[in-house]
């Protein structure tokens, strides 16, 4: 969701998504993302403790990263560690708005966007189903009052602002490192530079993948894999905003790589059949 707004505001004008472009995009339009995060926090606070797990998955995946991590943090006293890890992996990716709307527009094919959307969803569900862990282990011990007061609008706005700044900081950091790499290693082939960009930040890398002179099914596969993986910027978002100690970084990285691999294979198959 964050990537959608920032790239639509800055990238479409030919600007790089650097600190200047991000800040300009944030203040050029109303803070829609802050409103979305605020509403999500208020909704989570008012969800009953018995809310079904599929509903949490649908909420986290539909809102996009880092909302899944925020849900894990809010529900870590109510879900087993294995379910928390599965939710963490399944929802650690771009929102359907970006997958279907933005990428479909960039590829000039809504059907291609639908293929990417279905591929990333399939990859997330499959990768999360393979996450292991103790099913009946008690949730992490958290000192919470038995009757916690309801979340007020003011506190929700404050938490949403912190979340938005964290997300933007991770995006800027990924793009800065990608730009520095391209600047200092200009002699390297463009493929290597693109690969490093894909490893660091997903939205800018996705725009570069769209522009590749490749058949549409191959671009759909690459975009499915990249958005399923999410890049290090999204991994950092989820680690910063998710429960502490839920997953080690190597485990999280491996799960997201598996998410991306499955998404790429499914995306290519759907593109070959439907496009």
Image (spheres, rainbow, N blue to C red):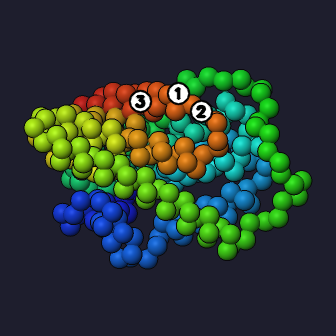
Q: What label sits on residue 251 in the rendered view?
A: 1
Instruction: Give the mark nearer the N terminus: 1 vs 3.
Output: 1
Q: Residue at x 47, y 56 (%)?
A: 167
Of the 4 image quadrants, the one containing the N terminus is bottom left
Name the residue furthest front.
184
Camera-side residue of 259 and 23: 23
Horizontal and vertical percent position of residue 176: 30, 52
- Location of mark 3 (residue): 257
SS type, badge 3: helix
Between marks 2 and 3, how big is the CA–CA gap? 15 Å
- Location of mark 2 (residue): 247
Q: Residue at x 46, y 39 (%)?
A: 121
Q: Callout 1 environment at 10 Å: few (<14), some (14 to 19), or many (20+)?
A: few
Q: Callout 2 environment at 10 Å: few (<14), some (14 to 19), or many (20+)?
A: some
Horizontal and vertical percent position of residue 12: 23, 63
Instruction: Give the mark nearer the N terminus: 2 vs 3.
Output: 2
Q: Is residue 250 left or right of residue 260?
A: right
> CB of mark 2 within 8 Å of CB of mark 1?
yes
SS type, badge 1: helix
Q: What label sits on residue 275 in the rendered view?
A: none
> CB of mark 2 within 8 Å of CB of mark 3?
no
Residue 238 versus residue 189 in the image, above or below: below
Of the 4 image quadrants, the one containing the C terminus is top left
SS type, badge 2: loop
Q: Is residue 174 left or right of residue 250?
A: left
């Amino acid at each position: 969701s964050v990537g959608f707004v920032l790239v639509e505001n800055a990238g479409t004008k030919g600007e790089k998504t650097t600190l200047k472009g991000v800040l300009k995009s944030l203040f050029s339009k109303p803070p829609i993302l802050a409103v979305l995060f605020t509403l999500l926090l208020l909704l989570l606070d008012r969800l009953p403790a018995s809310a079904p797990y599929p509903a949490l998955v649908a909420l986290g995946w539909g809102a996009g990263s880092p909302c899944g991590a925020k849900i894990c943090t809010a529900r870590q006293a109510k879900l087993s560690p294995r379910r928390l890890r599965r939710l963490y992996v399944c929802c650690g990716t771009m929102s359907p708005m970006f997958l279907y709307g933005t990428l479909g527009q960039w590829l000039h094919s809504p059907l291609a966007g639908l293929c990417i959307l279905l591929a990333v969803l399939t990859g997330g569900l499959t990768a999360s189903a393979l996450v292991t862990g103790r099913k009946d282990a008690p949730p992490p011990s958290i000192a919470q009052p038995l009757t916690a007061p309801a979340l007020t609008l003011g506190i929700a706005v404050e938490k949403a602002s912190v979340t938005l700044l964290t997300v933007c900081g991770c995006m800027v950091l990924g793009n800065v490192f990608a730009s520095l790499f391209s600047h200092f290693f200009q002699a390297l082939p463009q493929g290597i530079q693109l690969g490093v960009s894909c490893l660091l930040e997903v939205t800018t890398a996705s725009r570069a993948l769209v522009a590749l002179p490749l058949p549409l099914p191959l671009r759909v596969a690459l975009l499915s894999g990249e958005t399923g993986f999410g890049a290090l910027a999204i991994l950092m978002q989820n680690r910063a905003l998710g429960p502490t100690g839920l997953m080690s970084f190597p485990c999280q990285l491996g799960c997201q790589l598996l998410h991306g691999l499955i998404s790429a294979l499914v995306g290519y198959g759907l593109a070959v059949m439907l496009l």
